[in-house]
Image: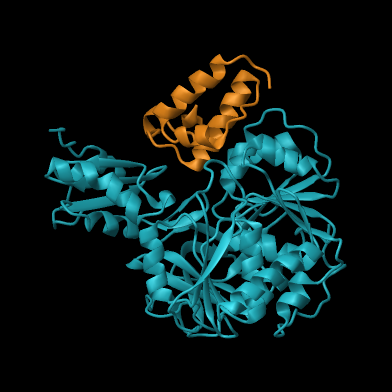
Amino acid sequence: MSNTGWATGAPLTTTPDWVDELLLAGDDRDVCLHFGSPVDRAALRHAVADRENTLRRLGLARGGAIALRLPPSLAYAANLLAAWRIGAQVALLDHRLTAFETDRALDRLQPQVVVSFTGTLPGGLRAFYDVTDVAQARDGHPAATGHAVIQLSSGSTGPSKVIARTAEQLVAEIDRYTRMDGVPLPGERVVLLASVVHVLGLVGGLLYCLHAGVELVLPERLTVDAILRAVAAGDAPTTLLGVPFHTELLASNPNPPKLPQLKRMTTGGELVRAEVAQRFTDRYGIVLGNMYGMTEVGVIATDLFGEHRPSLMPAPGITVRESGGELLIATPESPYVGLSDPTRWVDGWLHTKDAGRVDPATGLMTVLGRLDSQVSVGGLKVDLTEVEHTLAALPGVESAVVVYDGGIEAYAVVPDAAAAATLEGELAVRLAPYKRPRVLHIVEQLPRTATGKLVRDHAVLRTADAKPAT
Amino acid sequence: MLASYGERSPEQVRERIDSLELAWLVHQVEQRHGRMLDLDDDVLVRMTTVTGAVEVLAEVLAEPAGD
């Protein structure tokens, strides 16, 4: 159960060939990925070399900038690794972003090459896609910084934050995983339920598994049956990696099949609710572990044996402290590029905007919830302020409040019924599906405090008079 | 059935169904009816509203169980 037998003891180091040395190395016939069918190291190296040729032909070079707008797929993994082999900076754009959001991101990032996909994606419950990737050169600029990866995060002041990490930081995160007890071991399998485009699935899934020699399996679909079939398809000890929703989904199966190879489930994001965690461990008889991390840092703290719940132990090499009720993470450099809220990173400390505490005696930390307007929708962070600003900026909207009450809900004052009728369509153009309000209330007026501030209390908002349909 | 995800009241369930709720709904229906639903992508896309999901399930469950 311990990793200490294979961790070298010395931190991994980053060389210019880090992709080859730390991720792609291994026996030709060693199956490393499973996107619908097994992919061995020889096939992965071939796919990467193929993309590398394409990207170089388009002029991408060391220090260049590329954006990937691909759904979870072998094409995504191959393009990512190819661009890193070239030494380019890769911006990862969620394929669910609307054309409007994608254009805005490309305007901001100015990459020299964009890799997208042809055709429309099949809908519904997919963990991965079989896509044809298309790389196109555009009139962009080389990377302005030496970072290897750029991710956009829903920003609290409207425009998204640009979060950047260097190859050294990615390698250091892979190294943290190798030093933690309770992560999948070489020769084992991971069935990945989280998106391979976001930090948990990207580093904890794809990069760690490639490095450690753990087979990474994506189920055909994200249904209970397909997930359990993916587990049953191999004999090696298997870990499920996902977000709390996946635990809740699996826990609802009263009679799961006996799967002796299923060893553990680990979730990232918020904590699995206590009764769901209990039901899951009762029904599957396996350990439910928990991780806490951020796009800016990757994995920060873990409880992979479910023994400290709801607390977590900071990962090796991570220093956490509490200041004014907020959790701060020691990070030598700011992870933000360009204009950004100066309160997010101060003097070597990243402000998580998560309320929490650190027990000085044990070192265990506990996350108590968000201090800002971010919410988690299916493991993806959404800033309610971004949604609210987008809604308030639409034609005909006089004022708007967006709150979270089991789902994103919007309240808006829109005197013109014709304008009100177009709002959902307008939002669909501007916001990715997971950011859109699940319900849009058109009201006569929004409740305000005595000093005129908009009230964000759910109970009060529900009493706002609905505007009669005209 | 959707309300059982996240322990909501039926009034808290919205018309639009997101992908997490869809996975939940398909699983709940499979359990309640003791059969696998082999839904293709066009059908799943229709199930992104409560109204659409009710229509689809009425059609699918009216078919004889089998392959």
Front-lying residue, A411 or A127? A127
Q: Name the residue located 22 percent from the left edge and 52 percent from the top edge.
A: A400
Locate the N terminus of chain A by quadrant: bottom right
Task: Point out residue B40 in the picture as x, y percentages from the top left corner.
Answer: 57, 34
**Residue A30 in sight:** yes
The spot of residue A182 in percent (x, y) is 76, 58
Chain B tint as drawn = orange
Q: Residue at x 74, y 43 (%)?
A: A230
Which chain shows up in cyan?
A
Q: Is residue A188 left or right of residue A348?
A: right
The C terminus of chain A - image quarter: top left
Q: Is residue A178 above or below residue B2?
A: below
Nearer-the-camera pick, A164 or A94:
A94
Q: In the figure, residue B60 lies in which quadrant? A: top right
| Depth order, front residue of A319/A437 | A437
Left or right: residue A467 compared with residue A306: left
Give the percent coordinates (x, y) of residue A460: 24, 42
Q: How many marks?
A: 0
